[in-house]
Image (cartoon, rainbow, N blue to C red):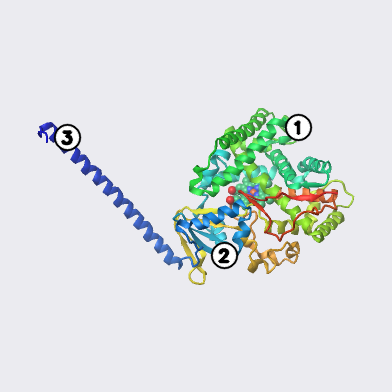
C-alpha cells in the first residue's frame, strides 16, 4: 500500500468522475435506443392492427440450429446445378407464402401475385434493393441497378430517352450481328453449342446499342480480355448478391482486376464518343453515339456515363442470351412446335429478303413460343426487395394464409418468378410442360402479376422491346437458315426443369444448348 497523496487522490477523483460520465452517457444511449425501438415497435403494431395483419402462417422447416441443414442442402444442390429442381417439391408443399429463418434472420418468400404487386407497384416506395447496391458497386458503379429513390428515378428518366431514340427501332441495327451469327454457325459442322454463340451475339448487339460500335471492332486480345473480365466480374457479383449482407466476404484480386478492366474498356468508348462532339460526324455515324451523347448531356461526367453503360450491359447481355438458348433448347426437344414455327416464318416472310418489325409483329406463334420460354425459364428467376420502412403485404397471414402480413423495416422478401410461373393453380395441371399454345386463346391475357419475366411497375425492364426484337430476329434467321435443326441423337432428354441449370444473377443452361445443324 502506498501513501495517499493529494496528487493521486486527484487522479482517483478524475477517474471516478470520468467513469460516472461514461456510465451516464451509456445509460442515456441505451435508454434512448430502447425508447426509439419501443416507439417504432408500437407504431408497427398499430399499423398491423389497422391492416388486420396476422403472422405468416407457414414456415420453411429447419432442423439444425441457424438453419445450417437448409444452407447445406442448398449449397450441395446448387453445386450439382439442380437447385430449382430440388426446391420444387418443397415449394409445392409450402404454398405461395412462407417465412424462413436462416442464421438468425427471418425473411419471407412469396410466389403470390398480390404480394408481388404490392412490392413492385402499389407500395413501391416502401421497398429498396438493400445490399444489392454494395454487392454490385465495385463492378457497375453508380447506375440504375445500384440506385434507389431519387437517384434511381433520375437514371430511369434519363435512360428511357435513348432507348426510344436509338436506331434499333427499324431492326437494321441487328442485321450485321445476325449475319455474323449465321455465318459463324454455317461454318460449324455437326453438333454446335448455340449458347456460346448467343453470348457473343448479345455482347455485340448490346455494345453496339450503348457504345456505338460492337466489341468486335476492337483488337482481338483486348476484346477477349474484356469479355472474360465481364464474365468473371458478373459471376463473382452474383455470389456477392446471394450473400446479401455478407457480400464483402466474396472479393478476390481477380475480381478487382476484372472490374477495373471492364470500366477501362467502357471508359475508352466514352472518351472516343466525347471527342466526337461534332454534330455532323455523329450524324455520319448513323447516330451511333446517341446513347453516350444523351447521357453526357445530362450527367456532364464521363465516369458516371461509363457506369450507366456498364449497368445496361449487365442488364442486356446475358438475359437475352439466356432467352435465346432456352428457346432453342426447348424447340429442338419439341419438333412439332419447331415445325409450326417454321411454317409461320415461311408464310409471313416468304421470299422477302429483309426482316422488318412488321413481319415480327405478325408472327403470333413466335410470340407464344417466346412467352412460353420466358415463363418456364425467366432469365431473372429470383429477386429480393428489402422493406425500407415498415409496411404490409396483402396475403400470407393467418391460418388460411389470406390475411395481410406485417413486414418490419429491414426485412427482406424473396420473390421467385421461376416458381410463380410454374404454379399449377395459375397455369393448369400441365404448368411444367412447354406448350406455347396455352398463350393462344387469350385466357392468359389476364394473368397480370402472375407472369413477370420483365417485371412490371415503375422498375420494369427498360430493354424489353429491344430484347424481344433482338431475340425474334435471331430465332427467325436461324430457323430460315437451318430448318432441319434438331437435338443431337446422343443428347439425354429429361423433363423440363430437371436439366442442369447454372444459377447466377441469371438462369442459364449448365450444359449449353447443343444442337445438330444440317
Ligand atoms: C430477355 C431479356 C431480358 C429480360 C428477361 C429482362 C428482365 C429484367 C428484369 C426482371 C428487370 C428488373 C430487375 C429488378 O428490378 O431487380 C430488368 C430491369 C432492367 N432491364 Fe431488362 N431484361 C432483359 C433484357 C434487357 C435488355 C436487352 C436491356 C438493355 C439493353 C435491359 C435493360 C434493363 C434495365 C436498364 C433495367 C433496370 C430498370 C430499372 O431498375 O428501372 N434489359 N430487366
Circles 3, 1 touching at the beta carbon (< 8 Å): no
Question: Taking 155 as reference, is 468 left or right?
Answer: right
| Along the viewing direction, whichever of 28 and 52 lies nearer the viewer | 28
Query: Percent from the top left, x then y, of residue 404?
Result: 49, 66
Q: Determine which residue is flagged by label 3.
A: 11
Q: Residue furthest bottom?
A: 400
The label shown at residue 96 is 2
Q: Residues within 10 Å of mark 1 (few under 14, many from 20)?
A: few
Q: Nearer the viewer, mark 3 or mark 1?
A: 3
Q: Determine which residue is flagged by label 1.
A: 284
Q: Nearer the viewer, mark 1 or mark 2?
A: 2
Residue, x 56% and y 46% (percent of image)? 239
Query: Percent from the top left, x then y, of residue 296?
Result: 61, 35
- Does residue 336 show up? yes
Residue, x 63% and y 65% (percent of image)? 423
Q: Residue furthest right?
A: 351
Q: Residues within 10 Å of mark 2 (few under 14, many from 20)?
A: many
The disc, 1 or 2, on the residue closer to the chain's N-terminal end is: 2
Secondary structure type for disc 2: loop
Question: Taking 234 as reference, is 286 left or right?
Answer: right
Question: Taking 472 as reference, is 108 left or right?
Answer: left
Tell me which corner region of the image, top left, top right, bottom left or bottom right, holds residue 493: bottom right
Q: Marks 3 and 2, how far apart in space? A: 66 Å
| Along the viewing direction, whichever of 194 and 388 lies nearer the viewer | 194
| Along the viewing direction, whichever of 192 and 146 lies nearer the viewer | 192
- Does residue 461 show up? no
Q: Marks 3 and 1, how far apart in space? A: 82 Å
Q: Is 266 situated above or below 378?
A: above
Residue, x 73% and y 56% (percent of image)? 370
The disc, 3 or 1, on the residue closer to the chain's N-terminal end is: 3
Secondary structure type for disc 1: helix
Amino acid at each position: 500500500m502506498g501513501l495517499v497523496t493529494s496528487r493521486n487522490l486527484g487522479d482517483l477523483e478524475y477517474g471516478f468522475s470520468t467513469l460516472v460520465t461514461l456510465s451516464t452517457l451509456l445509460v442515456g444511449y441505451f435508454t434512448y435506443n430502447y425508447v426509439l425501438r419501443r416507439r417504432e415497435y408500437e407504431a408497427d403494431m398499430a399499423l398491423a392492427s389497422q391492416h388486420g395483419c396476422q403472422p405468416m402462417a407457414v414456415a420453411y422447416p429447419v432442423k439444425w440450429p441457424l438453419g445450417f441443414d437448409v444452407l447445406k442442402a442448398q449449397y450441395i444442390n446448387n453445386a450439382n446445378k439442380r437447385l430449382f429442381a430440388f426446391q420444387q417439391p418443397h415449394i409445392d408443399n409450402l404454398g405461395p407464402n412462407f417465412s424462413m429463418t436462416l442464421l438468425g434472420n427471418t425473411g419471407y418468400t412469396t410466389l403470390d401475385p398480390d404480394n408481388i404487386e404490392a412490392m413492385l407497384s402499389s407500395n413501391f416506395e416502401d421497398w429498396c434493393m438493400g445490399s444489392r447496391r454494395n454487392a454490385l458497386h465495385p463492378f457497375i458503379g453508380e447506375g440504375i441497378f445500384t440506385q434507389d429513390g431519387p437517384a434511381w428515378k433520375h437514371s430511369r428518366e434519363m435512360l428511357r430517352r435513348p432507348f426510344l431514340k436509338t436506331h434499333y427501332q427499324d431492326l437494321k441495327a441487328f442485321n450485321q450481328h445476325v449475319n455474323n451469327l449465321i455465318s459463324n454457325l454455317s461454318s460449324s459442322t455437326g453438333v454446335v453449342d448455340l449458347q456460346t454463340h448467343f453470348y457473343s451475339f448479345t455482347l455485340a448487339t448490346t455494345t453496339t446499342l450503348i457504345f456505338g460500335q460492337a466489341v468486335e471492332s476492337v483488337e482481338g486480345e483486348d476484346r477477349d480480355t474484356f469479355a472474360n473480365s465481364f464474365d468473371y466480374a458478373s459471376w463473382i457479383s452474383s455470389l456477392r448478391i446471394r450473400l446479401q449482407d455478407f457480400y464483402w466476404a466474396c472479393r478476390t484480386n481477380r475480381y478487382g482486376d476484372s472490374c477495373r478492366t471492364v470500366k477501362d474498356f467502357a471508359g475508352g468508348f466514352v472518351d472516343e464518343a466525347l471527342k466526337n462532339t461534332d454534330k455532323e460526324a455523329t450524324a455520319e455515324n448513323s447516330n451511333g453515339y446517341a446513347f453516350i451523347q444523351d447521357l453526357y448531356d445530362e450527367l456532364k461526367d464521363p465516369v458516371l456515363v461509363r457506369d450507366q453503360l456498364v449497368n445496361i450491359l449487365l442488364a442486356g447481355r446475358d438475359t437475352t442470351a439466356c432467352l435465346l438458348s432456352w428457346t432453342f433448347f426447348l424447340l429442338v426437344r419439341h419438333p412439332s412446335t419447331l415445325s409450326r414455327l417454321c411454317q409461320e416464318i415461311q408464310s409471313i416472310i416468304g421470299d422477302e429478303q429483309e426482316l422488318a418489325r412488321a413481319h415480327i409483329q405478325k408472327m403470333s406463334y413466335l410470340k407464344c413460343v417466346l412467352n412460353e420460354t420466358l415463363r418456364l425459364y425467366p432469365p431473372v428467376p429470383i429477386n429480393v426487395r428489402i422493406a425500407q420502412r415498415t409496411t404490409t403485404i396483402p396475403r400470407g397471414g393467418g391460418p388460411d394464409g389470406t390475411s395481410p402480413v406485417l413486414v418490419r423495416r429491414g426485412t427482406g422478401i424473396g420473390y421467385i418468378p421461376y416458381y410463380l410461373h410454374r404454379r399449377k393453380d395459375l397455369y393448369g395441371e400441365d404448368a411444367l410442360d412447354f406448350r406455347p399454345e396455352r398463350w393462344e386463346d387469350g385466357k392468359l391475357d389476364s394473368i397480370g402479376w402472375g407472369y413477370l419475366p420483365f417485371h412490371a411497375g415503375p422498375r420494369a425492364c427498360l430493354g424489353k422491346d429491344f430484347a424481344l426484337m433482338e431475340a425474334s430476329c435471331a430465332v427467325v434467321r436461324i430457323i430460315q437458315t437451318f430448318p432441319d435443326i434438331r437435338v443431337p441423337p446422343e443428347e439425354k432428354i429429361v423433363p423440363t426443369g430437371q436439366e442442369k441449370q447454372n444459377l447466377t444473377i441469371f438462369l442459364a443452361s449448365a450444359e449449353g444448348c447443343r444442337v445438330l445443324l444440317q
